[in-house]
Image (cartoon, rainbow, N blue to C red):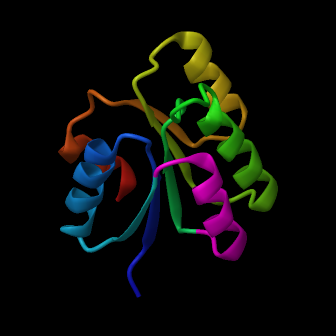
Amino acid sequence: MSRTIAIVEDDPSIRENYADALRKQGYQVTGYGNRQEAMRAFQTRLPNLAIIDIGLADEIDGGFEICRALRAMSATLPIIFLTARDSDIDTVSGLRMGADDYLTKDISLPHLSARIA
């Protein structure tokens, strides 16, 4: 069985770009465009890894809310923030609330793949 990855990203082109790259590496990837859609799916089944953007459409901290909810559901689920927000405050906040890694969107696909593997 392949590892399942959830990508929560409001920009469809970015979401599909990452999803396609990860699928080519054998991962089963599901994309979600907003917090509500992702949380409905996570109530049914958790992925093996969640990759989350912080700013989701009108919710500037929607990704932080997802991280809090996922951490309450599972203490061991790997969570990676993948976001354009690169301030120390955001990075430290994301890691303190339970994310396992915090990456900015300027990361290359090979680098992202290495972090996931």
Q: Position of residue 14 (x, y in %)?
A: 28, 43
Residue plotted at (41% across, 32% down): 103
- Figure check: 83 above or below 47: above
Q: Residue furthest bottom?
A: 1
Given residues 52 and 56, the one toward you in this image is 56
Position of 64 compared to 52: left or right? right
Residue plotted at (33% across, 71% down): 27
Residue bounds of the magenta highlight = 33-46
Quarter of the figure with residue 94: top right
Given residues 72 and 59, the one toward you in this image is 59
Instruction: Name the image quarter holding the N terminus.
Output: bottom left
Q: Position of residue 44 (x, y in %)?
A: 68, 76
Position of 102 compared to 63: left or right? left
Instruction: Name the image quarter holding the C terminus.
Output: bottom left
Residue plotted at (48% across, 37% down): 53
How many marks the image carries: the answer is: 0
